[in-house]
Each structure stands twice: as structure tokens, then as C-alpha cells.
Amino acid sequence: MTAPLALLASLLSAPLSETMMSVVGADGMSGSATVINQLLPDGGKYVRLSLVMTYENGARADVVQESTYDPKGRPVRFLQTVTGLGKRNTMVTEFDEAGAHVTIDPAKPPANVKWPEGPLDDPSQFWFVKTRPKVGQTVKFLRFRPAKLDWVESAVTYIGTREAVILGKLVTGNVVRVDGADALLDDSGDPLRLEVSGVTFERSAGVDSDK
């Protein structure tokens, strides 16, 4: 699942959206999440996920993920910070002409991974934000995994519209399939419902009924 926020805020255009979500997972895990999508002045995109999870045993984990993309949907910078059980772990990935540079321990040099041969542009980052895809439209590209220091093939497909009940209201969303997992998005590209690794995220505010 990337610059201090005060510095980043000075570089961003006006906020595109802020989405509040409830979070439910296995073993009694529950929590809340905030997703921010912002367009950058250069035409790129910034996404920030703030997640708070609590468990039946009272343990708590706080996760912050930031991702920045250029106007073609190529990665520019990733950041992930996980705080819990008295520990704080941060991973920063920065991309330049040579490839990806991953830093976990600031006292150590970053791990460097070259750009791969193959498609790197991901225009699906801007679906429903700048453009609306056609039903069945698919984007295939190579995605970087910082934790594994590798590039993997990824596919994103627009399946079409689907009705769902969110907060007791019947709404119509857009189904986008990402590597086999479906996400339900509104017409602005913000999440209504999605499942990631057995954890379900669902919009907890700001839902307008179709009926």
C-alpha cells in the first residue's frame, strides 16, 4: 500500500477530493481511513491514505501512504509510514532517470533498482479525474513493489457501472478491476467500496442516493 506535508502542500493545487471510509478486516480488526486525491500543477497526481486500525486485543496501528505520479501516471515518489506496538517504520521510494531508490533506514544507502524494459505509463491513475474510460478498456503496465524491490506486470480494466448500497443508500458506481480485485468508484474517481488483502473499505460519509 510519498516530503513533509507542509512542504508538499505548498506544491499542490486546490484539493480535488477527501473521502472518509470505514475499515473492517479479519480477527476483529476495524478502523477508519481518509483518502485524499489532488491534481498537481504539472498535471500529475498525489494520493494520500491515512489509516487507523484497532484490533480485539486493543493493539493499534497507524498507516500513512503517499504516492505521487507524473502526468503519464509514472511513479515519482512513494512513502509509507507504519506506527504501532511502540515502533515506527518508514519506507521512501524516489524515482529518477536511473530508476527506483528505496530507503528504509536513513543511516544506510538506498537500494537501487533500474527501470525495466516495458510499458510504464498508467493512464488509469486519471480515470474519472481527467478522462472517462470506455467499458472494457484495459491498461497494462509495470508496477514497482518497494517491499520486494521488483517490477511486476499490472492490469487495470474498467468493467462498467454497478449498483450498491452504501450507508443505506442505493448508489451507482464504476467498477474498476485492478489485478483481479474490484474497486467501486464514484464519477470523480473516489472510492465507494474496495477490498485490499482481506480488508474492506467503504465510504462512511458523503453518499448521494440515486433514488
Image (cartoon, rainbow, N blue to C red):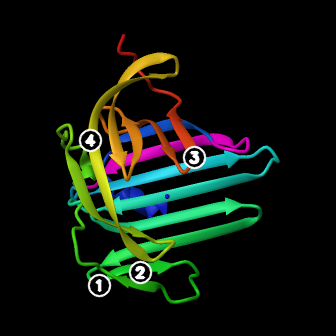
Badge 1 marks a residue whose secondary structure is loop
Residues marked 2 and 1 touching at CB (< 8 Å): yes
Relative to 79, is 89 on the left or the right? right
Residue at which label 4 appears: 158
Q: As shown in the figure, which amino acid type bears the numbered disc 3? A: Gly
Q: As shown in the figure, which amino acid type bears the numbered disc 4? A: Tyr
Specify the principal SS of the magenta part: strand
Badge 3 marks a residue whose secondary structure is loop
Q: In this view, does 61 lie above or below 117?
A: above
Q: Along the line of sight, which residue is nearer the eye, 104 or 169?
A: 169
Name the mark on residue 198.
3
Q: Which residue is drawn at 45% across and 77% down?
A: 149
Give, as a single range, the part of the protein colored magenta: 25-40
Q: Does any portion of residue 73 appear in the rendered image?
A: no
Whether residue 69 appears in magenta in the rendering, the answer is: no
Q: Which residue is drawn at 57% across and 45% down?
A: 199
Residue at which label 2 appears: 101
Q: Where is residue 8 in the image (x, y as percent from the top left)?
A: 40, 60
Q: Does any portion of residue 32 appear in the rendered image?
A: yes
Q: Where is residue 98 in the image (x, y as percent from the top left)?
A: 29, 84
Assess disc 2: are there few (<14), some (14-19) or many (≥20) residues with their C-alpha within 10 Å of its C-alpha: some
Q: Reading the chain from its start, which is encountered first: label 4 or label 2? A: 2
Q: As shown in the figure, which amino acid type bears the numbered disc 1? A: Ala
Q: Along the line of sight, which residue is nearer the eye, 58 or 140?
A: 140
- Give the distance between the C-alpha atoms of the residues marked 1 and 3, in whole angstroms: 35 Å
- Quarter holding residue 2: bottom left
Badge 4 marks a residue whose secondary structure is strand
Q: Where is residue 7 in the image (x, y as percent from the top left)?
A: 42, 63
